[in-house]
Image: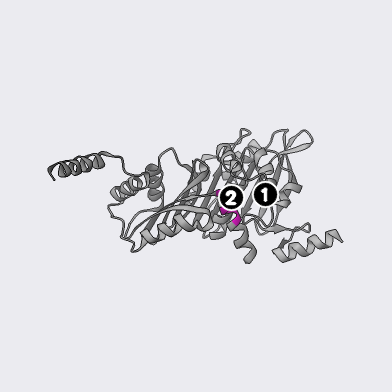
Amino acid sequence: MRTLLIWGLAAAFVLPAWALDNNIKMPVNLDRLAARATESVDVTLDASTLELASKFLSKDDPDQAQVKNLVSKLKGVYVRSFEFDKEGQYSLNDVESIRQQLKTPEWSRIVGVKSLKGENSEVYLQKNGSKIGGLFVIDAEPKELTIVHIDGPIDPEELSQLGGHMGIPNIGRSGKHENVKGAAKSGNKDQE
Amino acid sequence: MRRFLLLISIAAIFASLLPAGEFEWMVRQVSRESGVEPMHIPFFGLARFVVAVDHPAGATDLHLAVFENTEIAPEHFARMIDSAAGSSWKPMIRVRSRNGESTNIYLQQAGKQVRLLIGTLERNQSTLIEVRVKPEELIRFVDEHEHRH
């Protein structure tokens, strides 16, 4: 929970423009899930919050400038996460209304993982010409449901540069979580 | 002497008419809703002084109110803090658990600084915190803190 809060705070100051936009609305029934969940998390960083956060990031500090650049392009960020004490507390129909909204030509599903254990993950990208205009992640596990929406242009390269700052973990190119020393080592290797 | 007493009286009347600080007002709202008075925190004035002088983690001001024995459901608590905060505070993060815990974080711009309002409910103890921070210093603090772990 503490990590989540740090992430949330970091996001508030790091990502300046993430809001629910692009006509995607969280279904009302997600709020009802909160009553059944043992823990629910709702992070809402709308355009104005992100704009506010970006104002405070320095252009002179290289790290903050990177973040400012990334965040200033975003329109909003939403996270809804629910944890349940037993299985069957929610059905996939609960998120079907969102999935329906993603069935438009501009959104394409790039990842769909289904397991026999009932762990299903989907990643959708919003195409904006040759660029990414938004990202939507639905992660449904038997006792956990997480929905993430990043609205706005995303450059994966820029996103990876945020690792190691403001509580955001370092993600190496292999995709593995790295600590700072590990990141420094991999950086040296790249240079070699 | 009479003039002095008169001036004191007038000052006292005007002081009572002046609006209380926003945080104090929120504390009163929570107190009224929950029926519990905030507890006294010894030496908290000293803590505020240190924050104002030393700016730990970019914080420049700090307010804290702790309410003990608040028998409130997390949903009610969130609504109560929403109501006390009003529309000038932007709700940013809400965490709610069935075991009676609730965390609600709000944000507000204050010139070149940011004000964070944090309302938490845990085991019948609710806490209201308002902190004014310099965002760039907070970011630096979080970075350094992460690098140490």
Q: Is residue A7 left or right of residue B85?
A: right
Q: Quadrant of residue A83?
A: bottom right
The reply to whether the C-beta atoms of the residues labelled 2 and 1 are less than 8 Å apart is yes
Query: What crowding class fits label 2: few (fewer than 14 Cα within 10 Å), some (14-19), or many (20 or more)?
Result: some
Which chain is home to disc 2? Answer: B
Q: What quarter of the picture does the N terminus of chain B occupy?
A: top left
Q: Is mark 2 on a helix, strand or loop?
A: helix
Task: Give percent across and percent down for residue A157.
Answer: 76, 48
Q: Residue A52: image x %, image y %?
A: 56, 40
Which is more toward the observer, A65 or A46? A65
Density class for disc 1 (Cα within 10 Å; few <14, some 14-19, many ≥20) is few
Q: In this view, does A66 lie to the left or right of A191?
A: left
The quadrant in which the C terminus of chain B is found is: bottom right
Report which residue position mark 1 lands on: A61
Callout 1 amino acid: Asp
Q: Which amino acid does label 2 sit on?
A: Glu
Residue placed most toward the observer, B9 or B77: B9
Query: Magenta span has A42?
Result: no
Residue corresponding to mark 2 = B136
- Please give the chain letter of the residue carrying mark 1: A
Q: Residue A147 vs residue A123: left or right?
A: left
In the image, which disc is placed on residue A94? none
* Residue at 77% from the left image edge and 33% from the top image edge: A129
Element type at mark 1? loop
| Magenta range | B135-140
Spatial CA distance of label 2 from label 1 is: 10 Å
Q: Can residue A1 be seen in this view?
A: no
